[in-house]
Image: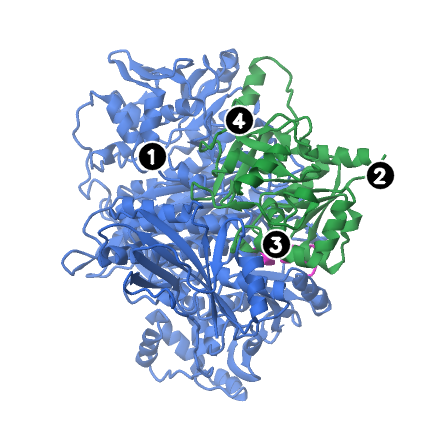
Chain colours: A blue, B green
Amino acid sequence: MPHRLEIALKPEMFDAEGEGIRLKAKNYFGIEFTKVRTVSIITIESALTEEELNLVQTAIFTNPVTQISSFEPLPVDFDWIIWVGYKPGVKDNPGSTAVEAIEDVTGRYFNKDEVVYTSKRYCLKGRNLSHADIEKIALELLSNDIIQQTKIYSKNDWSDLEGIGYIIPKVLLDHVPTVSAISIKSDEILKEISDKRNLALNPNDIPAIRSYFLKKDVLAARALEGLSEPTDIELEYICQARSDHCNHNTFRGLFRYADLDTGYAETFDNLFKTCIEAPTLYLKEKKPWVVSVLWDNAGAGLFDENSYYVITGETHNSPSNMEAYGGAITGIVGVYRDPLGTGKGSKLIMGSYGFCTGHRDYNGPLMPHLHPRRLLDGVIEGVRDGGNKSGIPTPFGQVIFHDGYMGKCLVFVTALGIMPSKIKEEPAEQKETSPEDIIVVCGGRVGKDGIHGVTASSEVFSENTPAGHVQIGDPYTQKKMHDFLLEARDEGLIAFITDNGGGGFSSSIGESARYSNGCEVELDRVPLKYEGLDQWEIWVSESQERMTVAVKPKHIKRFLELSAKHAVESTEIGKYTGSGKLHIKYKNKTCAYVDMDLLSAGFPQWEFDAVWQPPLMRGLYEPVITEPEDCNKLLEDILSHPNICSKEWICRQYDHEVQGGSVIKPLVGKYRDLNSDAVVIRPVLGSNKGIAFSQAILPMYSKIDAYHMTCCTIDEAVRRLICVGGNMDHVAGVDNFCWPNIQHHPENNPDGKFKAAQLVRSCKALAKMCLSYEIPLLSGKDSMYVDGYLSGRYGESHKVSALETMQFSAVSVIDDINNCITMDCKIPGDLVYVLGETRNELGASEYYEHFSYTGLNVPEVFPDQFIKIYRALYKAIEKGLVASAHGVYRGGLGVHLAMVAMGGDLGLKADIGCVPATGVGRIDSILFSESAGRVIATVAPCNKNAFENIFKGLCFACIGGITEAKDFVLHGKKHGDIVSLPVDTLKKAWKQPFGGLI
Amino acid sequence: MNRVNVLVLAGYGLNCDYETAYTFELAGAAAKRVHINSLISGHVKLSDFNILVFTGGFGWGDDHGAGVVQAVKLGTKLGDKLLDFINKGNLVIGICNGFQAIVNMGLLPGFDNNYTKRSLALTFNDCGNFRDDWVHLKVNSLSPCIFTKGLDKIELPVRHGEGKFYSDESNIRMLVENNQVVIRYATPDGKPAQGKFPYNPNGSVQDIAGICDPSGRIFGLMPHPEAYNHFTNHPDWTRLKEQIKRLGENDSRQIPAGILIFKNAVDFMIGRSY
């Protein structure tokens, strides 16, 4: 008999959650409630005695000061009730911690059939509410049908005695685990099975797979193990490893590039090798601070002689698109396992986010699964809980709104860690598995959740995408594991470590066994969430919060001891061997037996036609606009664009101080509300060294040319670092590509060849920029297929592709954090300088977008010129000559001069005729051109000469000064005052769009 | 006494242990991060320490009320040892999640020498969300709290979703009358925030940010002293640095308030041993 405990705040207590729902219902849907109260429900499926029940009720689940509770339904006033609970098999984190707490208090340990489920009911009060209103709130605000179930009660439906009844979302599979052999009689049959099993196997791989399993020696070796045709687990292994997500087939593909205008043609064999690997290897030789690149879960750079920092970036787009909260929390918690699995293990020191979604106020005809507003709310909360509960600061992030992300949103998550350079005298960045090492899995248990995640993200999102792979990350379980593994690392107990993410064991064991050249896995020893999983499911499940560790037999006892101390589950599930075979057994029966080198040869390279039509040929042109007369209003309007305006409400939800090393925070300035160019942390508390970190995303420029999009993105990320005191001599990068499908198809993807050409151009730009700015790519990932099909008004559906997007992360090591500066002007009387040249580059700018133009003149990057300015600025900052520095980014000079003034809460007066410019005479071009390479600096008058000496011969000018009077005045010789506004007015415009959100 | 020994709790989702130990070291103590289970199992003995820190973080994910499960676990497994520790005149500080935990254990408010009665709560912020921001705090100079001696106005960061201090009127009145209210959220000029957001970031009754027991030896607060362990932690430091430079003064940086709070505790324990 289950027990159902209802808990609510005392009636006189303010219900902040309920009030938040009331406001959202009103603001999002125009549905007015007079009151919303929440009731938490704990359903305990365990034979607790009455005494034990009372104990858990009072000691754990009811705060006597604020709450009331009852094992009967609580009498909370309502007109309607919505109940929301998880569907079977969805991770219920509070349910798991409730079990831990009950076990602690009662001393009774739960058996595998005893479970706690959590759910909620919302008691809604209001007049004239229809069932349809309530259903809307239930489905579009309070739940997501992919992971949750709901029930709606009117006054008539509700029974005070029964309440919600006893809802037990238990997974009951009643299935005997079975290995099936798969027929490879013909290519067609295998293709059919691949489709049926949702393997997303590339048809071109099928002949290679068949020919392997038909080889005589393979057949003979397998026969000895009792196998003939490939088993499902073997095919799943191959599919996971060959998926675009794991194997990067697109980037490793063959591109036949042709420029339709010039007739130029070139073939690129493997963009990864030519544009990412080659420049990075070249720079590794040149830069002694590059410690480890291109092989591990994250790359490593030198922090100081005793420690290395590590960095990697990921995306979690497809899952977030379906279940925003679950997808995003799984994304951030997942990327945190990469540094943890780098070298022999790294401590996490920082995370960041990048969200690309449709417009928050979208009200057009297309119907995405989640409205962009709701999707954004969900991903913000997911990263919030994932980061905050991991105890890792999240000081940097960006949000980009564009309708192209309605097909699939982008959720970028980036993680930095730090490791000691040596562990027990051994290099910490190195690791390997050896025969006889024990395979240990640590952390969470395996369930059906997360099966086929990797292959699904290699597909365009459709109604048929299996929902089963949506998960909810569990930062609590992972934090315990993180603490445990670092202690084990420091005792020298870890020979090899890697995470279980995409592909589950299939990739973590499959890849780690390459070092020893073989493994023998006993799948029946893997701890499961519930019985009834097939062997292949255990092998590929992506259930989260798990690491795979190689432990030497002599260390296993101590390793398990530490694991127990940290309340982390660790299980020996097999051993590494030197047999050359991937050998998987279940209850002593072999279910997979293939050669370790099966994946390394014989598979065909993917091929793409990439056809470039330059912008002019595509009919792009500069719009014909006359010079605007009311620049006051224009500037205010652009400051309140969603992609420019303040998003303080997001930053403040993220703990950016934890670990105690915050130096330059995400929000700076007198009122701590302007976005910093970059952030700086002090990861080693006793040291004055710091890590500066920034990111940039500029997808709009891809409308004209992804080559320049890429150059500008990288330049911006680097410039952001320089503006806080970063050093050009040490800039490391991480590239995250998110591209729509590039495989041409006459009906489904008619512009595939163009998108492929954009990718080639972007990669070429990446290589060029990395070489000229000398940025080794410590890590990088690609996520293809950012397309989706959205239903329209008439039962039709539309394919929506995202803009070609690349997020670039840049990191620099700061020698002395005391030299860092922020972007806000500091003192009246200071001089305002513009460094770098303004050109006629309004193409795809925020200004043109304001008038719905694209234009043609996209900003370009001139590395030789820019580097000189960045080096000079670094020198000036190091000498303490600069009071503030701020890059000119999206929106242009007008917008960013305003930011500098708003930051300092002081006035700024400047002559825009003095702005160093080429080919620009018009006010709008000077104010809104988005030319790269520019920085606004403020300098004390006494430092004028010293500052100008450093920049001698470079393109720069003093254009005005900071004033006590809080007015923002831009004037020109022929125009008089072009902009003249109180700084408060500018700030109001900039804060207004999302100012009401907390 | 040679060194003051500080035990900083860790494990089960707590997460401010490193910087808390570091800041206590800066304050002159010997600090050790200790897993909750090591304390329960007896591998580490509470009696070897002088100051016990309940650290910030998300113990047990904070799923059933912040600090609740930690309070239950430590109360059940360590109850008497803790009371012993307190009775011997040692110090306890609970920061953020640790404050929530010691309130739920009943270590605070400690009226009438009762250290097990749960009569206060830290509940969901009125703003409805987790919030990270620096706050201004006004110290009650009449409070017996050991940790805040000599401090007046300080700034520290808050980072929590459940920091609204709440209790019934009679308890609040007692806390105020006993001067157990140690720090209050304030405006930049040191006046009471009077509930005004964001100065009072969570809607705490009477702007209460931290309280102590009647002896002043147990201190609980929502803001994080350990996150202000360096000049560059302060949100205005680049501005202050520039101002100092213009005045032509030497870099006369003050000791961060976080270190001062811990130093008061360390100095008290040193003084007590003579």
Q: Residues within 10 Å of mark 2 (few under 14, many from 20)?
A: few
Label 3: element kind: helix
- The x and y percentages for residue A21 are 35, 49
Label 4: which secondary element = loop
Q: Is residue A125 left or right of residue A398?
A: left
Coordinates of residue A810 in the picture (x, y in percent): 48, 41
Distance CA(mark 3)–CA(mark 1): 43 Å
How many C-alpha atoms fall within 10 Å of the one at disc 1: few (<14), some, or many (≥20)? some
First along the sequence among labels 3 and 4: 3
Mark 4 and mark 2: span between their CA atoms? 38 Å
Disc 2 versus disc 3: nearer the observer: 3
Amino acid type at mark 4: Asp
The residue stretch that appears in magenta = A479-493
Query: How many labels were placed on the picture?
Result: 4
Residue B178 lies in the magenta-colored region: no
A794 shown above or below A805: below
User: Please, which chain is the residue tagged with disc 1 on?
Assistant: A
Q: Are marks 3 and 1 on the same chain?
A: no
Which amino acid type is marked by label 1?
A: Ile
Q: Which residue is mark 1?
A: A644
Which chain hosts label 3?
B
Mark 1 or mark 4, whichever is nearer to me: 4
Along the line of sight, the residue nearer the viewer: A920 or B161: B161
Residue highlighted by disc 2: B1
Q: Which label is found at residue B236? A: 4
Disc 3 marks a residue whose amino acid type is Gln
- Mark 4 vs 2, N-terminal side: 2
Distance of mark 1 from mark 4, alpha carbons? 24 Å
Q: CA distance from mark 2 to mark 3?
A: 31 Å
